[in-house]
Image: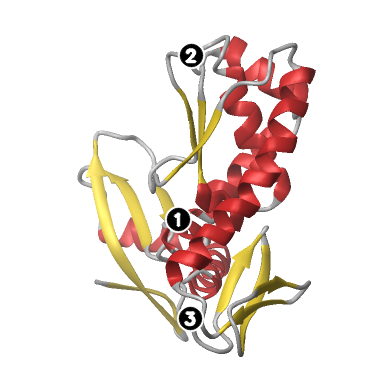
Amino acid sequence: GRVCYNRNAMIKIAKIIRSRRRTLAVEINREGQVIVRAPYGLSKERIEYFLASRQDWIASHVAKAADEKRAIQPLELREGAALLLWGKRRTLHLVPGENIFLTQEQLILGEQVTLPKLIQYFQEELGTYLRERVPYFAGLLGLPAPQIKLSQARTRWGYCNYRNQLGFCWRLVFCPPGVIDYVIVHELCHIRNKSHNRLFWQAVEEILPDRKQREQWLKTNRRVMIVL
């Protein structure tokens, strides 16, 4: 239903989830939907009052989610299409031929380039980056450079298997270099510690003290998984 914040604003609440919790909470999901978590038996009036007190926060986060959703859409090979590449917004510019070039603002794509060839280009670009950065961070951690592979995963950015081989989702090419570095360090630290306990996070933060900010980018921009 709709909850009235004031005389001029109406916001649609996607879902109210009631449970044994004692406090009210509101969250905005990646689709920009407003989710309310409330205790059993709490009145509609109390929920409305709670939402009214957070109106500005809700409006700003709904708008932010909408902006991110517009910025990160499945890529269409058409003139002017937008995408993130290395974490920067670019537009697609089609030209005759079958070459691919990257500038600060554009991905210049030959009209004869097929989608599989474009994906191969992205994979090669990420592979080049990984072959430089994985050994670098392995050295900082006192580890030998491991074997690395690219994966097609859409649910995880990287993995470290029982043989201590590392795999990385090729769609990391859409993320900023600093965020890719976080995924690299995360998986390297799993070579010594397969869990996510306190010692694991300490090892990550010894190399990347701001790992939480980098991790947050991945959570906020997870839609880059659906670009291609």
Q: Position of residue 87 (x, y in %)?
A: 67, 59
Residue 213 visible to an observer of this rendering: no
Quote the CA–CA distance across marks 1 and 3.
Answer: 17 Å
Dot 2 crowding, Cα within 10 Å, few <14, some 14–19, many 20+: some
159 relative to 146 in the view: left or right: left
**Residue at the spot 31% in from the left edge and 35% down from the top edge:** 21
Q: Tags 3 and 2 in contact by the CB under 8 Å rule? A: no
Residue corresponding to mark 3 = 77
Q: Position of residue 200 (x, y in %)?
A: 59, 15
Reply above or below: 44 against 150. below
Quote the CA–CA distance across marks 1 and 2.
Answer: 24 Å
Instruction: Tell me the SS state at disc 2.
Output: loop
Location of residue 136 (image quadrant): top right
Q: What amino acid is labelled 3 in the image? A: Leu
Q: What amino acid is labelled 1 in the image? A: Met
12 relative to 104 in the view: left or right: left
Q: Which mark is residue 194?
A: 2
146 relative to 50 in the view: left or right: right
Residue farthest toward the front in the current orientation of the protein: 97
Residue corresponding to mark 1 = 225
Q: Earlier in the sequence, mark 3 or mark 2?
A: 3
Location of residue 31 (image quadrant): bottom left
Q: Earlier in the sequence, mark 1 or mark 3?
A: 3
Viewer-nearest of labels 1 and 3?
Answer: 3
Dot 1 crowding, Cα within 10 Å, few <14, some 14–19, many 20+: many
